[in-house]
């Protein structure tokens, strides 16, 4: 059964495992008809997932349209996070660009608001721009965004009590249970991996059995449990593109957390490159 966590200081309670809609909209994980995609979203909700992450760049807006179709009749029961600043046409973090982007997203989502609005990979100048934050605060006041944020480093998030959603927990597919069937690279915004990277990553993954053997977990479940061991993490977002992922990843909440000794050993093995 999926557990839920507060997202930072907000009133939002999100499922520990979230759903990134890029898997259904981008074409990188196979082709899904609208009916197939909506069916998987419905099954994710039925499995306890209430947190859905999307961006205008996911299939040129298709991801948002899929969410709108899937949850228009139960909008208040799901938590949707979308982004501004980047679209297929380029980068625009201007106040006018932010408003235009959000209005287009709301239209595709068939919703008057998003629960979480994020700046999509902003640069330092954008983060330091007071006009950007004034615009975001205005959008909150207008009811178009309940909460706003950007990606934070763990220590900063801990200090200011902000929750984070972590994507790409399976290293582009290397840590998936069915890694041999994964087409590399899989993660949308990440750089293409060359053959040498993939070979090294596979060897490292092969040396990780001690993390999950004897615990009843798969490697992919152990990777999610490790990330959820960090107290600033509200939700982890694996790449879900098969129905069987829902049961596998949803079961992660049921496993006992890693001990501090185990987490220390994982950190040490990471420092050593997992023996490769």
Image: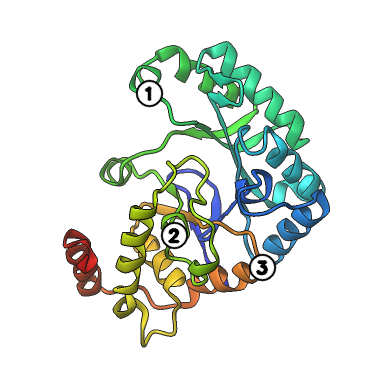
Vertical comparison of 176 with 154: above or below: below
Can you tell which mark lies on residue 47?
3
Q: Residues within 10 Å of mark 3 (few under 14, many from 20)?
A: some
CB under 8 Å between discs 3 and 1: no
- Residue 87 image position (x, y, % from top left): 59, 26
Drawn side of residue 64 relative to residue 256, left or right: right
Residue 110: quarter of image: top right
Which is nearer the N-term, disc 3 or disc 2? 3
Residue at (49, 77) in percent of width and height: 254
- Alpha carbon separation for disc pair 2 and 1: 26 Å
Tag in front: 3 or 1: 1
Q: SS for tag 1?
A: loop
Which is nearer the N-term, disc 3 or disc 1? 3
Can you tell which mark lies on residue 180?
none
Q: Nearer the viewer, residue 269 or 112?
A: 269
Drawn side of residue 233 relative to residue 25, left or right: left
Vertical comparison of 78 with 64: above or below: below
Which residue appears farthest toward the bottom when viewing the image?
214
- Alpha carbon separation for disc pair 3 and 2: 21 Å
Residue at (56, 69) in percent of width and height: 250
- Residue 56 image position (x, y, % from top left): 63, 32
Tag in front: 2 or 1: 2
Can you tell which mark lies on residue 170?
2
Q: Which residue is mark 1?
A: 123
Drawn side of residue 261 relative to residue 21, left or right: left
* Quadrant, the C terminus: bottom left
């Amino acid at each position: 059964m999926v557990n839920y966590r507060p997202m930072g200081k907000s009133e939002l309670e999100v499922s520990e495992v979230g759903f990134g809609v890029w898997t259904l909209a981008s074409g990188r994980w196979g082709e899904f008809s609208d009916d197939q995609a909506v069916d998987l979203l419905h099954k994710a909700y039925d499995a306890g997932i209430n947190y859905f992450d999307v961006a205008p760049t996911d299939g040129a807006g298709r991801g948002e349209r899929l969410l709108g179709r899937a949850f228009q009749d139960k909008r208040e029961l799901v938590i949707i996070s979308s982004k501004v600043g980047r679209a297929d046409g380029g980068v625009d973090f201007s106040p006018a660009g932010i408003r235009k982007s959000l209005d287009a997203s709301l239209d595709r989502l068939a919703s008057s608001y998003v629960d979480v609005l994020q700046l999509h990979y902003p640069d330092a100048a954008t983060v330091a721009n007071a006009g950007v934050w004034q615009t975001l605060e205005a959008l909150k006041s207008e009811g178009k965004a309940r909460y706003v944020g950007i990606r934070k480093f763990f220590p900063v998030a801990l200090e200011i009590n902000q929750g984070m959603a972590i994507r790409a927990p399976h290293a582009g597919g290397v840590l998936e249970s069915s890694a041999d069937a994964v087409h590399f690279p899989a993660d949308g915004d990440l750089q293409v991996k060359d053959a040498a990277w993939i070979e090294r990553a596979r060897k490292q993954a092969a040396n990780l059995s001690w993390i999950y053997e004897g615990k009843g977990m798969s490697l992919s479940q152990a990777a999610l449990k490790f990330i959820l061991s960090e107290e600033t993490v509200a939700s982890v977002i694996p790449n879900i593109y098969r129905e069987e992922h829902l049961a596998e990843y949803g079961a992660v909440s049921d496993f006992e957390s890693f001990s501090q000794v185990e987490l220390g050993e994982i950190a040490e093995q990471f420092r050593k490159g997992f023996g490769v």
